Amino acid sequence: MIDLNVNIKEKEKNYHIFIESSDIYSFKDKIVRYINGKNFIVVFSEKVYKLFGKVFNFNKDNIYILKDGENQKNLKSLKKILDFCQKRNLKRDDCIIAIGGGVAGDITGLAASLYMRGIKFIQVPTTLLACVDSSVGGKTAVNTCFGKNIIGTFYQPNVVFINTNLLKTLDDRNFKTGLGEVVKYAFIEKSCLCDIEYDLINFLDKKQKLILAKDPKTLEKLIEICICLKISVVEKDEKESSLRKILNFGHTYGHAIELFTKYKKYTHGECVVAGIQFAFSLALENNLIDKNYLFFMQDILKLFNFKYIPQPKLNKLIKLMKNDKKANHEFIRFILPVDYAVVKEFDLNEMLTIS
């Protein structure tokens, strides 16, 4: 088992992330021991409950099932979860557990941060996307018709339990949506200011076949690398005032695509990959990188055969990108590549000239 520590400046926020590939039938016991006899509810994503509900075997009275899909991450679903907490008579020292992908984790985390002004929160991510990114770092949110993750809080989990055997049932598309975030970390690695140099780009190249085969030990290492990079960033900037902005690489454009297609046509990871491609093109157009680095990026993406997303007319996306929570009143903010695994933030209203 891999045991990683997240050390936030406010020590009471510190927590452990456990990564393993053990028998999932014994996995529940570790979660239950952490609850330590307190009252709790479990928010399951619908698909995960169908696959693993009997394995976890929680009392049905404690289970809230959240329908699948990004469009379920809304205020209506949030209210239902909060109502369920009250129905189950949860108190401040009790616990909410999220078992599912990023949608379940994000909305459950928000509910945990709001209920009684903060209740214990356990993350059990079951998708690669949630394992490498959304389950760690404390961002919680719901979407609105105006944009993605517009309403949310920074609220760190109390513990994160990851078991790579839960990833075996992911279909090819959902597995690759997680790889979209993995590739993001590869292209920002040096900017994460991590004490250890992992060379994630090279790891992806060498371990491509094992990654696509979902080899448990390879996935353990892959998840560990991505989380260590994120921990390095979050420990230095918990609430995205400076360094943490680099984690938005590929996301400003990607979120606009998601909203433009009403969260129905493409997955989050597919949109992030499209955002990475757009960021590289924008960087080349403005002489921040040379063509060789753009071609190199394309070769890395080809390793995993990501779904191609045709670019809509840019003027249709600009308004959506201006509504992004990271924009200000004058500029759209982008994280762009400037060197191998190095990115920087730019205010780019005047740069958006790519056809």
Image: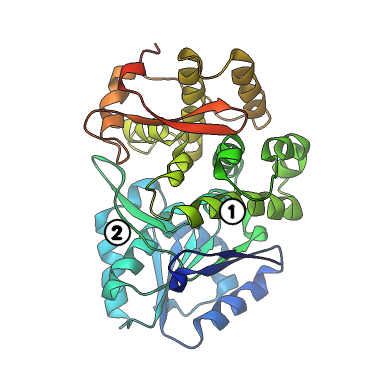
Find residue 286 and report its horizontal and vertical position in percent: 45, 15
Distance, label 1 to label 2, CA atoms, is 28 Å
Question: Quadrant of residue 44 in the image?
Answer: bottom left
Q: Residue at x 57, y 51 (%)?
A: 132
Tell me how the rendering is colored: rainbow
Of the two numbered discs 1 and 2 on the same chain, state the one appearing first in sequence: 2
Residue type, mark 2 in image:
Ser
**Picture quarter with the N terminus:** bottom right
Q: What residue is pinned by disc 1?
A: 227
Q: Is residue 43 left or right of residue 288?
A: left
SS class, disc 1: helix
Q: Residue at x 25, y 27 (%)?
A: 319
Residue type, mark 1 in image:
Ile
**Picture quarter with the C terminus:** top left
Q: Residue at x 40, y 30 (%)?
A: 334
Find residue 216 and report its horizontal and vertical position in percent: 73, 55
Q: Nearer the viewer, residue 307 or 279?
A: 279
The relative height of residue 264 versus residue 9 in the rendered view (above or below) is above
Q: Which mark is residue 77?
A: 2
Number of the front mark, 1 or 2:
1
Q: Is residue 123 left or right of residue 200?
A: left
SS class, disc 2: helix
Q: Nearer the viewer, residue 90 or 199?
A: 199
Q: Which mark is residue 95?
A: none
The relative height of residue 108 versus residue 201 in the rendered view (above or below) is below
Q: Residue at x 63, y 72 (%)?
A: 27
Q: Nearer the viewer, residue 95 or 70?
A: 95
